[in-house]
Amino acid sequence: MKNEKVTVPGVRARKRSGPKIAMLTAYDATMARLLDEGGADILLVGDSLGMVVQGLPNTLPVTLDEICYHGRAVARGTRRAQVVGDMPFMSFQVSPEKALEAAGKLMKEGSVEAVKLEGGEIVAEHVHRITSVGIPVMGHVGLMPQSVHAMGGFRVQGKAEDDALRVIADARALEQAGAYAIVLEGIPSELARRITEAVDVPTIGIGAGPHCDGQVLVCYDFLGMYRDLAPKFVKRFAELGEAVVSATAAYVDEVRAGSFPAGEHSFGAARGPARSAAELRVVGEEPPAPEVRYGGACR
Ligand code: KIV
């Protein structure tokens, strides 16, 4: 399991065989490499990048081209995990045909292995159209951030029984349309348990309690780097935000004090004041060959 590539049939099989699916978001190759090495099963190039990478108040302005760009970066850093691309707001809602075109673009230009889209019964036809050509679709019901304005904010969904029944019907519709897994976001634990029992595909929860077949968190949240919001469902598994702030303060101090860079971070032995290439030629010496450079930085 540790090194085996995660596939769509493999994800589906985890519903019966376990272990639970551990999914995280990723937006760049370096982070993807680390999360993949740590054993994450699925890396989602989420439209949450609008909030945690672009600094926007919600996900609505994120474009398909942006998800494609970040998808390529994440795919380059990933070996074992399955890479899933989020279909952004208005890239798929208009019609099943438009949804298929957008999903195809995301697969071709975003290097992803599956797409995820928000919505239940209302997008079931879209999901069917996409999956019918062999593109795997992950569904997403409950709290759907692309409907933030309709919901009156990022609010827990399905608390009242008629709302709960609607979320269950949404999940069933997605399963029937061919979704291979369904994200359950921001719903009571008991409702997540009912949905997990009602559908035959894995459920992956975020703010949906412990009864799902897997869990997903935004990488900047679980690492303690995104500190603008602190939702109850987020557990910080590290405090990298603190670590970045104190590392930066230490760097600033050392640069100002002149203690960085020290000898071990510098090239060549200093013999008197540095002489330019022109000065060296005047005294009959050849200037040294340039160091190997990557984008201006010697390594
Ligand atoms: O965009 C995202 O990161 C998501 C997850 C929170 C499921 O949709």
Image (spheres, rainbow, N blue to C red):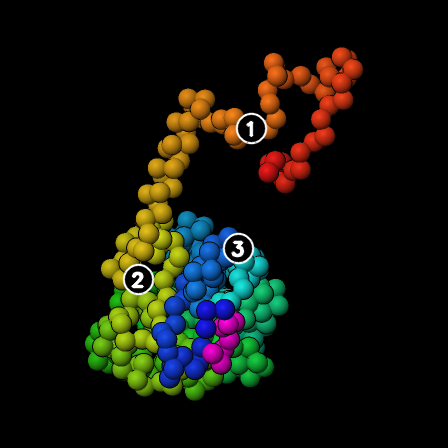
Image: magenta residue range = 4-10
Report the quarter where the C terminus lies.
top right
Q: Is mark 3 within 8 Å of ligand 1?
A: no
Residue annotated with mark 2: 154
Point out the frontmost of discs 3 and 2: 3
Q: Are marks 1 and 2 in contact (CB under 8 Å)?
A: no
Q: Is residue 286 visible?
A: yes
Q: Which residue is mark 3?
A: 29
- Establish if 263 lies above or below 229: above
Q: Which amino acid is tagged 3?
A: Ala
| Picture residue at 45% right of the left edge, 22% below the top | 258
Secondary structure under the numbered disc 2 in the rendered image:
loop
Give the residue type that dot 2 points to. Phe
Q: Nearer the viewer, residue 64 or 287?
A: 287
Q: Is residue 122 above or below residue 227?
A: below
Query: Label 3, label 2: how many angstroms apart (C-alpha)?
Result: 29 Å
Residue at numbered disc 1: 266
Does residue 106 appear in this view? no
40, above or below 128, in the image: above
Is ligand 1 closer than 8 angstroms to the Cβ of mark 1? no
Towards the viewer: 75 or 174: 75
Say whether residue 35 is left or right of residue 194. Answer: right
- Please tell me which residue is depicted at 32% across the width and 48% down the height of the picture: 239
Residue at 41% across / 52% down in the picture?
52
Question: What is the distance, in whole Å, between disc 3 and disc 1 at their CAs?
Answer: 28 Å
Kind of residue indicated by mark 1 = Ser
